[in-house]
Image (cartoon, rainbow, N blue to C red):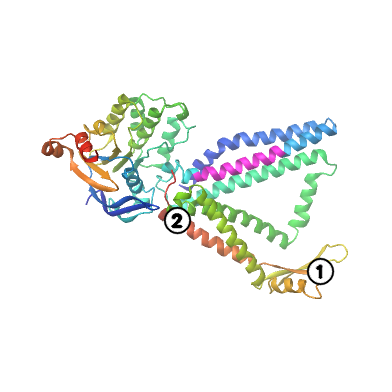
Amino acid sequence: MSLIELKDLSKNYGHVRALDRLNLNLDGGRIVGLAGPNGSGKTTLLRILGAFDAAYSGEVRIDGHKPGLETRSIVSYLPDKTALSDWMTANQAIAIYKNFFADFDEGRAREMLDFFKLEGSQKLSQMSKGMREKVQIMLVMSRDAKIYLLDEPISGVDPASRKTILRGIISQASENSLVLLSTHLIQDIEPIVDEIVFLDYGRVVLHEQADKMRAERGQSLNEAFEEIFA
Amino acid sequence: MIGKLYRLEMKETWRVAKVIYPLMIFATAAAVLLSLLNNAALTGISVFVSILALVVGSIIVTVQTVTNDYHNFQGKRGYLYRAIPAKSSDFLLSRLGYYLTYFVVTLVIFALLLMTILNSIMDIGVFSVVGNFLSQVLFANSWGILFSVYVLISIVISIFTFIFAITVGSEAKLHRLGAGGPVLVYFIYYLVGQVLGLLSALFIPLGVRMTVDPFSSAILNFELVNEGMFRSLLDSMGPNPDPNTAVIGLGVIFSQLLLTIVIAILTYRSFDKKFSLRA
């Protein structure tokens, strides 16, 4: 059984179809890149998987369960916007996560805080966008989850920070967990992903092992992306 | 889990309340101190300003209570709150406690401070007048106690209504309306509640017949009767109306109870199964 199983998943926003009978299976122990142009349905898909949007049709199974109470304890979700209040410090955010998530590892959070060179006592309102992104990644990746859903974790941050963030993600993902990260910065994630899923108009247009694709098509992920979406 | 969720939500609004409550106390203290100077103009202005501060302060805390709850469960913060592995009932009960705490605390602070201001400018002891009213009128008989219980239940129902409007008004099908969704749902609820309340007060055969002294207009008697307001209303419009007796329909209690049960069920179902974060 795959960790994520999607069958004919559709989602509309009014008359606009965001996901169109999407079928996809993803297994554990993989880092999967979810790529596609703006409006291709990446965020919508991750929101449904994260149990933040219950209004869809089709079948969604996460470790055998519908997104909801059972899956919240095994899914760690990074939104594409800051979910924390500006007045919070990183230390307060850690305390909140420790309080609510049984799988949260404070030691791991402190390690990542050091790795990202962040001050625990600094308020989010005093941090740059990149620093806030790092705080959120630190919180999300410090959970011992089966599935990590990361929505645009490196967009809007400088290239050096992107590398640091991606190194932080790889270092914390456990061996059997599934990391699904959405982005349109293909060249940045190319070195770390095991699989790639390309979405367009709410449908999977390509789902391939990264190595196999490079070997068989003789293309980098970025070249394939440009060829498909040009 | 309910306690943890309650504390988390309380903390968000406390950031505003911890500033507003002391400001309200400061405004009251200033008005009381200035009234000691016995300058009529100064006292008038300070009392006006301080009462205005109490009203504005209470409104700010109340609005913050509602908007913070909206942002916690439908806005960007929903990505944290709704990621927490807690049951829908835990979320709903903690929210009920959160609303109840801020509404009641704000109401009590407002009432006490207002009484303090009035006490400083009036010759009668406002606290003793209110105390006498409570002990000798409101809590002196079972009707008064029932009325007090009804007021308390009404506050809880109002809170339910806010949670209902925010939750159901944020369902995916109303996504395009943004924050207008909850406003629309509240408006519809209000209309349905008014129509249902009026019909049940008129036709459900349970009411209180009130007899009034024709000379002093004092209420002479309360009597529980098996009739709604409809007959009394017809009589009052007929050729021989009796201005000294009236029936107040109590059927509204049943319709309110029914409506509350319905919105509680809708809220519970909607919270987990039909929602879509606005952010």
User: How would you rate the neighbour count of disc 2 (Cα within 10 Å): few for under 14, some for 14-19, many for 20 or more?
Assistant: many
Q: Is residue A19 left or right of residue B218?
A: left
Element class at badge 1: loop
Of B236 and A217, nearer the camera is: A217
What's the residue at 33%, 29% (across, down)? A112
Outermost residue on the left side: it is: A216
Q: Is residue B214 left or right of residue A215?
A: right
Distance of mark 1 from mark 2, alpha carbons?
Answer: 48 Å
The number of discs equals: 2
Q: Residues at marks 1 and 2, common chain? A: yes
Which secondary structure class fits the magenta region best?
Answer: helix
What percent of the width, then of the height, locates residue A9? 30, 53
Q: Is residue B172 above or below residue A171?
A: below
Query: What's the magenta region?
Result: B52-70
Say which mark, if any, is on residue B270: 2
What percent of the width, then of the height, locates residue B171? 45, 53
Outermost residue on the right side: it is: B215
Outermost residue on the bottom side: it is: B239
- Where residue B243 sits, quadrant-wise, is bottom right
Please name the amino acid that badge 2 sits on.
Ser
